[in-house]
Amino acid sequence: MNRVVLVGRLTRDPEMRTTSSGISQTRFTLAVNRRTTNQDGTREADFINCVAWRGTAEAIAKYLTKGRELAVEGRIQTGSYDAQDGTKRYTTDVVVDNFTFIGSGSANNNQSGNYDSNNGPSNNIATTDITEDPFKDFGNEVALSDDDLPF
């Protein structure tokens, strides 16, 4: 199984390009903090190259900027190419299937939500006025005894 989930911050603004066949591609790098600190007590980060395609690529390029924290889910893909100097170069990217905004963005991007490449954007935050009964419209009260509970 090839699945990866990362939480980090964008190191620069995402770069979107369009292929010759009209498919959107966005590349970006996530700085992901390590769980432990080094000998100096400093927390180090890994810089992970990511690529997104189609609608996911368009949403990332449109809504995200340098410094924005997000979670991505996808798969690791490796590749290689011959550089201009004749040496073989190897690449490792996370191909992003979906992502979730984390924290707040700038004043223009102050939104939280997620984007699933299969279903598009959705908002995963619900707000409820806690001074009101959230179940008031669900009908009559249900009386339960301890014997009705499975735990």
Image (tube, rainbow, N blue to C red):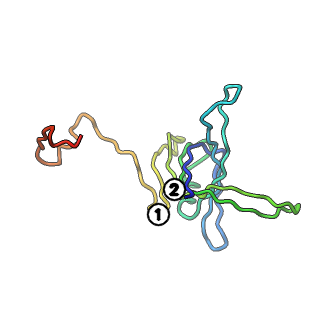
In the image, 141: left or right of 14?
left
Work out whether residue 63 or residue 55 is closer to the camera in this orientation and state it. 55
Q: Which mark is residue 118?
A: 1
Picture quarter containing residue 136?
A: top left
Which residue is outermost to the bottom? Answer: 21
Residue positioned 57% across, 59% down in the render: 57
Could you tell whether 89 is left or right of 121 in the image? right
Q: Position of residue 111 (x, y in %)?
A: 47, 45
Q: Are marks 2 and 1 in contact (CB under 8 Å)?
A: yes
Q: Would you name the residue on which mark 2 appears?
A: 98
- Quarter of the image where the C terminus is located: top left
The spot of residue 92 in percent (x, y) is 69, 55
Say which mark, if any, is on residue 43: none
Looking at the image, which residue is at 20% across and 38% down? 133
Quadrant containing the N terminus is bottom right
Label 1 Cα neighbours within 10 Å, binned few <14 / some 14-19 / many ≥20: few
Q: Residue at x 13, y 39 (%)?
A: 145
Amino acid type for the residue under numbered disc 1: Asn
In the image, what residue occupies the spot 68% across and 59% down?
78
**In terms of secondary structure, where does tag 1 sit?**
loop
